[in-house]
């Protein structure tokens, strides 16, 4: 009975990982390039569970899957089931200095924005990199942008302004860094926090907290669903 319970626990953990992989919910937690590691982990759990009768006994090196070790497997499984995967949002922004992201991206130049447009959709990160390198925010006056992200209303922005945001991750959500653009909609009410939107408009400049930054003047704001991959790599 003990062997069966432990074996079923390992299989349940493997099935949970496979469920996250097949539904795409794993992309809310880690970067896509590491998916093969999760498949490998799931396969390892299945193999271990199926061969558990051998591992249950005392091996030549004292290998034994004890109840305490089993608890280490059960803990993340229970946490994963009780706390469904969800993307980072405004709650994570509240503890971060999103107002400084315009000056912290590595220099790449505004040309990278145009090159990115030719390769794929231009992201918030592409613009943030361009702004960080530019000598004068006014150099972006009149340039158009089509950006998708989630809305957030920081306390430091005046009425009629809010931010559209994404998180950039390297490995997983633990190293996530927010990037955002200030959006101006003037008299129109901003979308609620965490609402995903597509913003189309053109850039101008404004002084915020004593610093002149580029601001996206929204011509259209469309509510959209959460994308399959909400993060930028």
Image: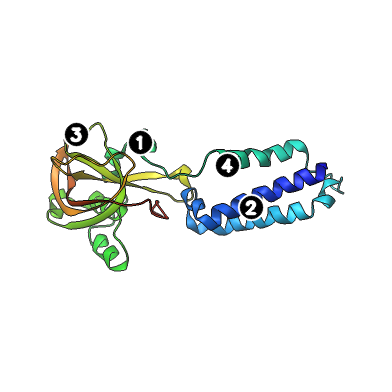
> Is residue 103 something one can see in this rendering?
no
Name the secondary structure under disc 1: loop
Is tag 4's residue or tag 3's residue first in the polypeptide sequence?
4
Residue 194, x across and y down, in percent: 34, 42
Mark 2 or mark 1, whichever is nearer to me: 2
Name the secondary structure under disc 4: helix
Q: Is residue 37 left or right of residue 125?
A: right
Q: Which residue is mark 3?
A: 209
Q: CA distance from mark 4 to mark 1?
A: 28 Å
Label disc, if present, on residue 226 of the rendered structure: none
Q: Are marks 4 and 3 in contact (CB under 8 Å)?
A: no
Q: Which residue is mark 4?
A: 81
Q: Are marks 2 and 3 in contact (CB under 8 Å)?
A: no
> Is residue 156 something one can see in this rendering?
yes
Name the secondary structure under disc 2: helix
Q: How dense is the environment of label 2, judged by Cα within 10 Å: few (below 14), some, or many (20 and up)?
A: some
Q: Which residue is mark 2?
A: 15
Residue 27, x across and y down, in percent: 48, 53
Q: CA distance from mark 2 to mark 3?
A: 50 Å
Residue located at (23% from left, 62% from top): 111
Label disc, if present, on residue 96 of the rendered structure: 1
Is tag 2's residue or tag 1's residue first in the polypeptide sequence?
2
Tell me the quadrant of the picture where the C terminus can be found: bottom left
């Amino acid at each position: 009975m003990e062997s069966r319970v432990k074996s079923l626990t390992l299989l349940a953990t493997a099935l949970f990982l496979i469920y996250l992989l097949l539904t795409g919910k794993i992309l809310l937690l880690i970067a896509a390039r590491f998916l093969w590691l999760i498949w490998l982990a799931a396969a390892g759990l299945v193999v271990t569970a199926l061969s558990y009768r051998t591992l249950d006994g005392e091996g030549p090196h004292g290998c034994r899957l004890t109840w305490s070790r089993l608890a280490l497997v059960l803990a993340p499984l229970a946490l994963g089931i009780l706390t469904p995967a969800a993307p980072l949002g405004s709650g994570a922004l509240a503890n971060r200095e999103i107002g400084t992201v315009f000056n912290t991206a590595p220099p790449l130049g505004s040309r990278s924005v145009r090159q990115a447009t030719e390769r794929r959709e231009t992201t918030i990160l592409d613009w943030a990199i361009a702004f960080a390198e530019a000598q004068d925010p006014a150099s972006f006056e009149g340039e158009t942008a089509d950006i998708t992200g989630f809305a957030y209303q920081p306390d430091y922005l005046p009425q009629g302004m809010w931010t559209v945001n994404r998180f950039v991750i390297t490995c997983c959500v633990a190293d996530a860094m927010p990037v955002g653009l200030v959006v101006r909609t003037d008299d129109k009410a901003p979308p609620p926090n965490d609402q995903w939107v597509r913003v189309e408009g053109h850039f101008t400049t404004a002084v915020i907290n004593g610093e002149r930054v580029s601001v996206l003047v929204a011509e259209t704001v469309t509510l959209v669903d959460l994308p399959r991959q909400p993060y930028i790599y």
